[in-house]
Image (cartoon, helix red, strand yellow):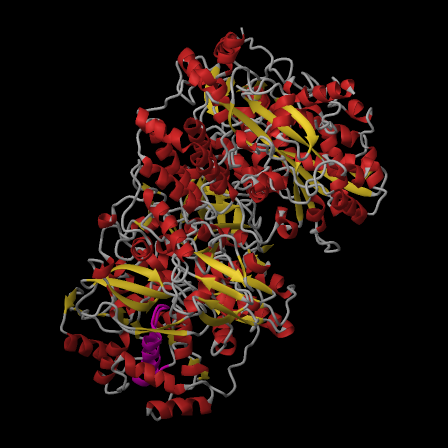
Amino acid sequence: MTTLTPVLSAHWDEKDSFTMAGYKRHDGYKAAEKALKMEPDAVIQLIKDSGLRGRGGAGFPTGMKWGFIPQGDNKDHYLVVNADESEPGTCKDMPLLLANPHVLVEGMIIASYAIRAKYAFVYVRGEVTHVVRRVQQAIQDAYAAGYLGKNIFGSGVDLELVLHVGAGAYICGEETALLDSLEGFRGQPRLRPPFPAIAGLYARPTVVNNVESISSVPSIINRGAEWFSSMGTEKSKGMTIYSLSGHVTNPGQIEAPLGITLRELLDLAGGVREGHQLKFWTPGGSSTPIFTAAQLDTPLDYEGVAAAGSMLGTKALQIFDETTCVVRAVLRWSEFYKHESCGKCTPCREGTYWLVQILRDLENGKGSEADLAKLLDLCENILGRAFCALGDGATSPITSSIKHFRDEYIAHFTHGGCPFDPYASTLFASAKAGA
Amino acid sequence: MTTQEQTAQVVDLITVVIDGFEVSVPKGTLVIRAAEKLGIQIPRFCDHPLLDPVGACRQCLVDIEINGRAFPKPQASCTIPVEPGMVVKTQLTSPVAEKAQKGVMEFLLINHPLDCPVCDKGGECPLQNQAMSNGRAESRFEGKKRTFEKPINISSQVLLDRERCILCARCTRFSDQIAADPFITLNERGALQQVGIYENQPFESYFSGNTVQICPVGALTGASYRFRSRPFDLVSTPSACEHCASGCSLRTDVRRSKTLRRLAGDDPEVNEEWNCDKGRWAFKYVTAPDRLTHPMVRDASGELQIASWPEAIAAAANGLRGKRAGVLVGGRTTVEDAYGYSKFARVALGTNDIDFRARISSDEEREFLASRVVGSITSNADIDRADSVLLVGFEAEEESPIVFLRVHKQVRKRGLKVTAIASKLSIGNEKLKANFVSVAPGAEAEAIAKQELTAQSVILVGERASESAGALSAVVALADRTGAKIAWIPRRAGERGALEAGAIGNVLPGGRPVTDAAARADVSAMWGVEKLPSEIGLSSEGIFAAVNSDQIHALVVGGVDPHDSGNNAAAIKALKSAFVVSLEIRPSEVTKIADVVLPVAAVPEKSGSFMNWEGRSRFFEVAVPDSLNRSDVRILSMIADELARPMGISSVKSAANEFAAFGEWDGAKLNFSPVASVPVPKIAADQAVLTSWRRLLDESSLQEGEDNLAGTARKSVVVISPKRASVLGVADGDSVRVSNQHGAVVLPVLVEAIHDDAVWLPRNSLGSHVLATLGVASGSLVTVVKD
Amino acid sequence: MAFTDQDIQVMDSIIKRYQRSRSAIMPLLHYVQSRDGFITNEGIELIANKLDLATAEVSAVSTFYTQYKRKPVGEYHVGVCTNTLCAVMGGDAIFAGLKDHLGLENDGVTEDGKVSLEHIECNAACDYAPVVMANWEFYDNQTVQSAKDLVDAMREGNPPAPTRGPNSLPTWKENSAVLAGLSDGRAAEGVQAGEASLLGLKLSKNQDGAK
């Protein structure tokens, strides 16, 4: 059995974990102090050595990203933290920020120092007021403590950290859309190249990192690259937060080394809800192709999940048991992508509009096998044709569900409607069953 | 390839292979344009060579590999520059690209209405055409189409049909990137994304018509053309715009002898592919019901009577014969017609009393034109290369809108520094992020003298510089001191050509000074006349004064409005007392009093050329072929024949040939004698110094009848400074009265950045006809009070 | 409602957070909602004026983001997550139940102006499914009945405290000010973490205990 490794979540059970006092009780801001005494390039090297990879979904090596920022270019550099957590199923960054916003602030101080940024932003999605309060308070307290502002930690280095609150747009989780949003535009993705490392915020070199990635930095500074890389698998180093939700006995956040399997996590969480069996699950949010019980032993690291035909994504493990209609699930996700498509490019804007109409008909028992072929063909016309990954993501649930559950689609039109009882899949149903 | 790409200094060529063919193109060329060079048309919608690449429509997807490494998915060829070792496979050779394109086309069509039969764009629609060439024959879409209210007015001139829109964002990018008028934007998102305005701010941009032209579907249409024709029923003629000195290339589309629309032509060196809304939508004056169609001669009872051409020509000749006469040309003539007037004055009337400046002007300006402007070659390319641009007596957006676009392009592209010496900060200069040097009207010279420029700088001088004594002298001194180039940009389309043709009292064709014997010898040899007058002639104001002092007794008048004159009372008095031959297209203040009225052809009815502010000539053919109206030069030639002093140029063509034969004058130009500035008048508390300019869209005669266009004009306001506003106790929108002994203008006030001593009025807009009402236009004291 | 000098001062302070003023457009729009409850024309015109933008540029931004409302919402704006996971776990039933209970359709507002209803997308609280948000505060693990009780309490003026949030539920306008980046001093209120957030930590401690 894999040993769990609570690092980020190690003190979330302390009532004042989100306060400066609570954070400092466990060596808070010591890492920043230490890093500011290192050469910035040494900090970048340390993060490179640790093997830390982006926790926002793509898994790009964090240290390498920092290393892309041109140095000595006499330009402002920016650090932007992506806290626009909105991928369906993903629910790790919000509890992290609620329970320990200071670890993000400290990580941002270190990262800004490493990339020579004097301005840093944290872009928090707008639908989480209490998270906004906590982050704002942490920033305010860090300013008061001299950790932000002029001459931080007496090091001669300046850093301004600005909280920017979103207003409801999933696409702003895409880093270039986020930058446009932060600049005061509609949050639509930008052409790349130029990449943010060359021309990001205000057309200046910019690093965009996920909350969990940056929050992992202080522990690496404190305990070393070796400590970090001793966890995880060959190419997927360190610990990470897995989010279990849905038809599982005890849903929640579990911090574990990369490479743990769903079977282990489910065991830890008390298994699929009582009396039911696993039907399908997402390894990393709705944009990652779904798995079934066949992938229970797939190592949940970047390579393992990819080899099995999906993506680790945000490690959002949404568990659905046999009471769930896969067509309904996929329709709902498709409606989400249609709602969140930014409208910029044709395949995503028009494609999601069309997909939803077909899926709605299928769920209502209207359709034929030809419609499945059409759906797959439309997905082929969206995947890799859209401007950004949102369009690609929209096709994942459809193509993967048809692959695994073609018969269930067909059952809808042979049955003349959805053969499932939606009530059976609710939490209330199990509560009643349990009672 | 865009101009931008062409003019880039790189001659670095990159060779790529597209569909098996090699092509070498300059570094930075986009794949889609490299393919064009081979004649391979990749379908596209959002791509436009003059707009920043956006890659939004995804129609132009192609397969690309570089040095054997293939991109994992098809790429938008409108966003990817060529690279060495690149191999591109378009829809012609890659099944993947072909399927990708067909897929995108199918997506574009699922929500597109099937109203092609009633759509203005039908027949010239990129969506229709490319759906035929690159789409699927049948749609697989069985669902519900997105619907919107059809169409909505986003200005009085432009209508938007959101159902037809494919969201390529050409219009919104144009408005933002080119015109700097981001009044239309993409709103909402996803499948509901739509072009729109903010509800309280219509799309009132001087350049809005370009969005109609570049819309690749029928989503944006112009109210004036809507449902008027099918594109295949139109006969198109390349033409030149008559509205201003920017010199746009146009295309005039005519159906059954009537111009139905005008489009911007493609001239990278002048207007790129743009024009302004006046140039596009002000052409109904040609078909106005009151067009003059027959010659008229005033009878003994003082009534104009229709006459035959021989009768009218004889009457004109009889009236002119033996009298000292002056020639007022007007600023809207073609080069050929101006040349006709120039030759007519010298050959038929034996005088240098000729002036094309039917506006406020000065002798300082005339000397400036003869010494610094005629033959000069400052051009748009100099703006493109300039390190800074200085604006003097010139409001680019209002007075020469395509020059504004040119300057704005450089401001946006490379932060070109713009300085405006003016009394009021204009909307256009704000968009150019200009450094506004605020001066009292009349105090320009002092500010000009303080400017620091280099040999890379360009001074853009407008015709209003002549309204401030000493300003042009200061410009000359500044240019001499710094090496900066001077560009004189008059408002009217014919002025530069008329100057080159010698339709002014101090120079003959080609800038030959009338006072220079060798120059005169050149000209008299060419014209076959023994002798030419050698005294510098009178200016237009001098001519009116000479009539009023009984020295001149006859006038030949082209398209001139006496109210444009700096002294309209004197002008009207002179016109009433002299024998007047008027060459006109429509009844005017002049035809009301003229003794002989000769109808002439409007621009689309004749051939000829306009010379823009750069001195660039653009020849155009007749667009409305069956008009009976004749060009001015032909009529002048007939009068000269009748006077037995033949000009020998009875056609536009012969006039053009003869003028071209003159060539450049390589002798000395006239000297420029600097003029001192006049102290700005002292003002009392309720007084201000007047300043004004004409707005692009106003009450000018060539815009009459264009109600849709007029609806987008800027509202008439009187502009005062915050300080004056607080003294007067007025706020935006309050009524303010500007008056002098002649009259008063009352308008809502706008409190803005203007010199504290100045008050600004639109010169010729609704409710504000400054010259007609106040008799002055700038530099004079007026009383400003709360109404 | 006219914006006061004090409002203008607050808006200026928001603009000052950024090196480039246009970046302030989103917090300023949140601020307009904290004043007017939704995005008013007056607010759009004021922002355009402050940031030197065309009004169309401001409305283009405001219509892109779903949290900016075109018309007044309730004093308590209720969002029921109906993205797949919450929907399956009961979100659909909750939303249907609330529509029926309040007599509202999606985006409707009760006549007394107290409660408005919207179905929302994933709110990053899947381990607490089904989730209901009120003025963007978390109400975790809801049932049809608990959601009905919640809106009834709102209409009576005493809604219960959020599950993971301040000690009492702020109004829509009050929370809009927080989203504009204006502190309400309530960051320390409420739990540091919910039960589900602590799952892994507890399991780990059990593992340690077992060793």
Quadrant of residue B600 in the image? bottom left
**Where residue B349 sits: x, y (%)?**
31, 82
Horizontal side, residue A340 vs residue C204: left or right:
left
Horizontal side, residue A171 vs residue A343: left or right:
right
- Does residue B655 appear anywhere in the picture? yes
Image mark count = 0
**Where residue B194 sits: x, y (%)?**
40, 41
**Where residue A117 sits: x, y (%)?**
73, 45
Horizontal side, residue B326 vs residue B305: left or right:
right
On the rendered image, what quadrant is the N terminus of chain A found in? top right
Q: Is residue C154 above or below residue B450?
A: above
Inspect the magenta stretch and tell me whether residue B480 lies in it: no
At 22% from the left and 61% from the top, the residue drawn is B232
The span picked out in magenta is B326-351
Quadrant of residue A414 in the image? top left
Q: Is residue A121 above or below residue B528?
A: above
- Does residue B241 appear anywhere in the picture? no
Q: Is residue B594 above or below residue B644?
A: above
